[in-house]
Amino acid sequence: MRYLGHISIKRVIALLFVCVIWPLLSILSLNIDNIPGITSKVTLCSLQAQSQPKQISLRQYLLTSNHQLQEDSLYYFQNPEDSSLYGVKNRQGEIIIPAKSRLFLNSKLDAAIMEGYIELPVRKSLRNYNAEAIAIPIREVYNRQGAFLYLAQFFDNGSDYFEQGLRRYVDHQKMGFVDRAGNIQIVAQWDFVTPFHYGYAKVYTGGWKRKVVDKSDEHWTVQPTSQASTSYIINKEGKRVFPVKTANGQTHNDAPTSIASDKNYKKKFNTPRPGCIIDGQLYPYPFHYSEKEQRIYHQINQNKQLKRYVSKHLYSHPSDIHFEIVESPSRYFPFYILQPYNESTLYGDMTIYVNVKGDTFYHYESFDELLTPLQQWLQKPSAF
């Protein structure tokens, strides 16, 4: 009792709270924050721990952040009579697409389809093995309800990649662009189109064919087939874009080495941000940001640690590098994507992912498909 006499009443109450009252409240699932005058430090610590972003695989992030994917999970399944044929079914076992396609599956059957679309090999009747063909359909793409959407263009032994939120598709030997949700953003109308880069793509019309440039038949370019063959530049709205004109009304036949030093560019567009040099001609700065996107843009471009990384690993002065938002969130892909450029040239393979709220930044490692909180990644010894 003598020892207890030195313990203050407040300390006794605290001990009783920790040893008796807190366990009882936990058992009864009561909200301790509703008790007047008492603050749950444990709860606050838990919330702080939960709010800290952690390293996570892209697949796991998509699955946990998208309730639609959880509720409408889709899976590939094998034809019971022929294991080389695959189809798609939902979590209830209902068949979305019959198992009639021969598919090389590089994932397990119990792995949910994470994309907003489904890809299956193109039917034989649609295949084009013409040696001079440019528009080559390689995959049939369906929505998650099983309705056909479009034919994906062939590239690198598979379907075309998404570049800046768009990829190429084929329709009656013409090419256009679709987004990750399967929506046709730019209708197929050209003989050939390049992927988007720095907000622009080059399109070819009037007659073009494929020309192989090596014996392996792996690398090829396009060649005009008539005097009507022509090409020009479009933006992500599918509209033709013309080169910047000089003070005397002429276009740049030989664009300046440094766009930032081009006085006409700065005067005409009233911005220090660089345009794009294509075929020796200067095109205007293509990006337009909302207020929220501007905050993301400035936050990433003002990150000093990131600038230090750029300076060391990309062998360029930090002031020469700027990140641009090349893709915005969509239903099944909840990220802004930023990439680094030296003027209009994609610099290195760094990719920054930002969540929909615009408050969490990740470094994305494409090989492992791994998202690491940017500041955590920058603190690794390997980053510097």
Image (cartoon, rainbow, N blue to C red):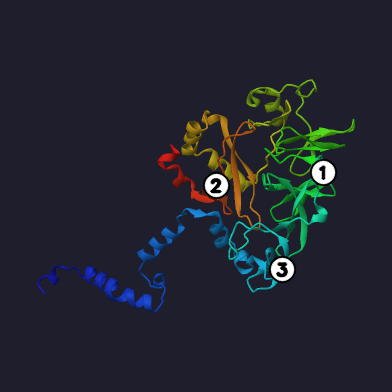
Quadrant of residue 225 in the image? top right
Q: Quadrant of the N terminus?
A: bottom left
Compute the Cα span from label 2 to label 3.
31 Å
Task: Kindly identify the amino acid type of the residue bearing the numbered disc 2.
Answer: Phe
Q: Are marks 1 and 3 in contact (CB under 8 Å)?
A: no
Q: Which one is nearer the viewer's eye here, 342 or 263?
A: 342
Q: Inspect the image, locate mark 3, and give the three-letter code of the amino acid beneath it.
A: Ile
Q: Please, is residue 12 above or below residue 104 in the view?
A: below
Q: Which corner quadrant of the image does residue 223 belong to?
A: top right
Q: Which residue is mark 3?
A: 96
Foreground pick, 271 / 244 = 244
Q: Secondary structure at mark 2?
A: loop
Find residue 367 and name its label.
2
For the residues labelled 1 and 3, the Cα–Cα distance comes to: 33 Å
> Taking 31 as reference, is 279 above or below it?
above
How far apart are the two marked residues, 1 and 2, measured between alpha carbons?
33 Å
Q: Earlier in the sequence, mark 2 or mark 3?
A: 3
Tell me the residue that label 1 is attached to: 130
